Amino acid sequence: MNDLLSRRNFFKLAGAGIAASTVSKVAMAALPEIVSAETANTQTPLHPNTGRPYNPVVTLNGWSLPWRMNKGVKEFHLVAEPVVREIAPGMKAHLWGYNGQSPGPTIEVVEGDRVRIFVTNRLPEVTSVHWHGQPVPNGMDGVSGLTQPAIAPGKTFVYEFEAKRAGSFMYHPHADEMTQMAMGLMGSWVTHPKNPKFMPVDRDFIFLLNAYDIDPGSYTPKINTMLDFNLWTWNSRAFPGIDPLLVRKNDRVRIRVGNLTMTNHPIHLHGHEFQVTGTDGGWVPPTARWPEVTTDIGVGQMRAIEFVANNPGDWAFHCHKSHHTMNAMGHQVPTLLGVKQDDLVDKISNLVPDYMAMGETGMSEMSEMAAMMPMPLPENTLPMMTGKGQFGDVNMGGMFSTLKVREGLSKGDYKDPGHYQFPKGTLAYEFVGDVPEASRQSVNNEKAAVEVQVRKPIGHAGH
C-alpha cells in the first residue's frame, strides 16, 4: 500500500485548512487544486486534519479525494476525463474516470457537512454527476436535461449541498450513462456519522462492482454490451490484480460494496459470518439483521456488511457466480469434457503449429499447461484463471480477493503479511493408502437408464 500524498505536505497544509499536496495561490482564490492519481494500488487511508473527525475508509485499489476548507465549506474538485487503468498485470484498458483513475477517488465527508464539488469535464461529450442515494435539493441531483443543463466539454459546474444522512453512496453520470458507465465513469462516496462512536469499526473498506467487455488485443470496452461481459472487476481490477483486505484478528470490520454492473452479484465471504448493517438507503436496525455468509447485491444497490475477524487465515472473498471469477472469458466456446481430441490435434497442428487442445478434462488444465510451457496470449488480455497461492494455482480470476486475518498487526498496519502459516494439525493433507471400493444398495425393478444427448443452442442466456 502506497502513500498518495506525502505526510509532510499533508500536515504542513492542514493548518491552512487544506488536505492536498501543493496548492497554488490562484487555486486558493478560485477552484480547489486538482489532485490526481494513476496508481492501481490500495492507498493509505486519508485521515482528516480539518473539519469534523471520522474513521477513514480504505478504498480497495483506490484512494480518497483530498479537500480544502473554504469558510466552513468542504470543497472537492472532480475531473471527468479519459484514463488508462491497469485491470491486472499484463492488461490495461482505456477507460473514462475521474482524477486519473477509474473508478474515481472516494469522497469522504461527515454528516452535517456543507459540501461543494467542482466538476470539470474533460471528456469528448457532455456529462453530469448524480449523487446516488443521497438526499439533495432537486437542482443538485445531476440528471442532465431534467434537473440541470449538461456539463459541456471544457466546462466546470458546481454542486453544493448538505450531507444530511450518514451512509454508503456512489456517484456516476446521468448523461449518456450507457456509454459513460460502460467506460468506467463512477466513484464511491461515504458520509460518516456525526458521532464517531456510532457503529464504530476498526477497519472500513469500500469498492464498486463493475464489468467490461474488451476483446483480446483491444483496449477500449464495447459500450453496447448488455450481459456478455468478459471482465468482471472490483474497482476496475480483476484478480490477481485485486489487493487483499488486511485486518487484525478480532477487528470489527466493515466492507461497503456498490454494484454498478448490469447484473446482480452474490458476494460470499469464507471463514466468517456477517450481517448486512447498511444500504444506500440508510443503516439497517439491529432487530432487522441476520447472520449471512453471502449477500446478493442488485444493480444500483449498495451494501455494508460487518463482522468480527476472529478466524485467522487467508480467506476467499468473491462473487459466487462462477463465470464472474474468470478473466477474458469467451461465451461461445463449446463444452469438450470427455471429448477425445488426439486425432484433431495432429490435423490442426499442420495449419496452426502452436495449437493446444483444451477442455477435455476441465478448464483447470489451462493453468496446468501454462505452468509447464509458455502459452502466448493475444495482445492486452488476461489468462482466464491465473491467480497463484502458496500451494499452486487458485484457478480464480475476476471478482476474487482474500481477507487476510492476522494476529499482531498494529492498528494502522495495512502491509501485506504474506502467506498464512498454518498451525500444526490445521492443514488438509493427502491420504496415503488403499481406498475401499464403492458399494451401492441394490434396487428392485430398476429401470434401464437412458442416456440423453442434447446439443444446447449456442447463445448466452445471461448470468
Image (tube, grey):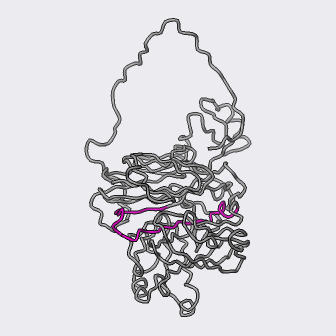
Quarter of the image with the C terminus is: top right
Magenta residues, start to end: 179-206
- Taking the image as shown, residue 125 lies to the left or right of residue 66, namely right
Relative height, residue 381 to residue 354 (above, below): below
Question: How far across and how far down the image is residue 362, in percent?
Answer: 56, 36
Relative height, residue 400 to residue 363 (above, below): below
Relative height, residue 153 to residue 414 (above, below): below
The answer to whether residue 361 of the structure is visible from this angle is yes
Q: Is residue 200 magenta?
A: yes
Q: Is residue 308 magenta?
A: no
Which residue sits furthest bottom? 25
Question: How far across and how far down the image is residue 452, in percent?
Answer: 65, 21
Q: Which residue is rendered at x = 42% and y = 45% of the image?
A: 293
Where is residue 81, by image quadrant?
A: bottom right
Question: How far across and how far down the image is residue 232, in percent?
Answer: 58, 53
Q: Nearer the viewer, residue 54 or 102?
A: 54
Relative height, residue 138 to residue 335 (above, below): below
The answer to whether residue 83 of the structure is visible from this angle is no
Quarter of the image with the N terminus is: bottom left
Q: Nearer the viewer, residue 217 or 186?
A: 186
Which residue sits furthest left? 424
Question: How far across and how far down the image is residue 237, in percent?
Answer: 54, 59
Where is residue 160, by image quadrant?
A: bottom right
